[in-house]
Image (spheres, rainbow, N blue to C red):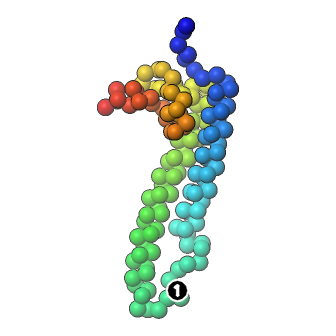
Amino acid sequence: MAEKTRYTDEELEEFRLLILEKLEKAEREYDNLCNSLRNNDGNGTADTSPTFKALEEGADTLCKEDAARLAERQRVFINHLRAALVRIENKTYGVCRATGKLIPKERLRAVPHATLSIEGKEQKR
């Protein structure tokens, strides 16, 4: 029996639904992070006594830096998920770019935007 070279349309649809679900969640989290960066929640230091204001502003800056890093990581993750949807449309989803073999379903369910199998990752080292 010949080795499969791509996933079936039914399997691709299963992955598409999984990715859409993850994408929706990721976009919500990204929006929340962006809103916290814009201070849209109204939790600033304007109503704080002057004694604690400097400390709170420093802590606020650290929180904003963390949120900015998280937002950037989330944006990259969203882009990877969108690229995976394009690969599904092109019917190249799940094919390892290093080995040309199918990435196991278990790996794709855990990391749906993966473009390398474990074997492919090891070859890249």
> Between 67 and 119, which is closer to the camera in this rendering?
119
Q: Position of residue 122 (x, y in %)?
A: 35, 29
Q: Please name the residue that numbered disc 1 is placed on.
A: 46
Disc 1 residue type?
A: Ala
Q: Position of residue 91 (x, y in %)?
A: 61, 25
Work out whether 60 lies above or below 85. below
Which quadrant holds the N terminus?
top right
Query: Which picture quadrant has residue 53?
Result: bottom left
> Between 113 and 108, which is closer to the camera in this rendering?
108
Does residue 64 appear left or right of residue 82 in this picture?
Answer: left
State the residue lying farthest toward the left. 125
Query: Which picture quadrant has residue 117?
Result: top left
Q: Position of residue 33 (x, y in %)?
A: 54, 62
Q: Position of residue 99 (x, y in %)?
A: 43, 21
Does residue 1 appear left or right of residue 118 in this picture?
Answer: right
* Residue at x 55%, y 72% (from the top left corner): 39
Work out whether 101 lies above or below 76. above
* Residue at x 55%, y 36% (from the top left corner): 109
Work out whether 27 lies above or below 33. above
Which quadrant holds the C terminus?
top left
Work out whether 48 lies above or below 57. below
* Residue at x 42%, y 25% (from the top left corner): 98
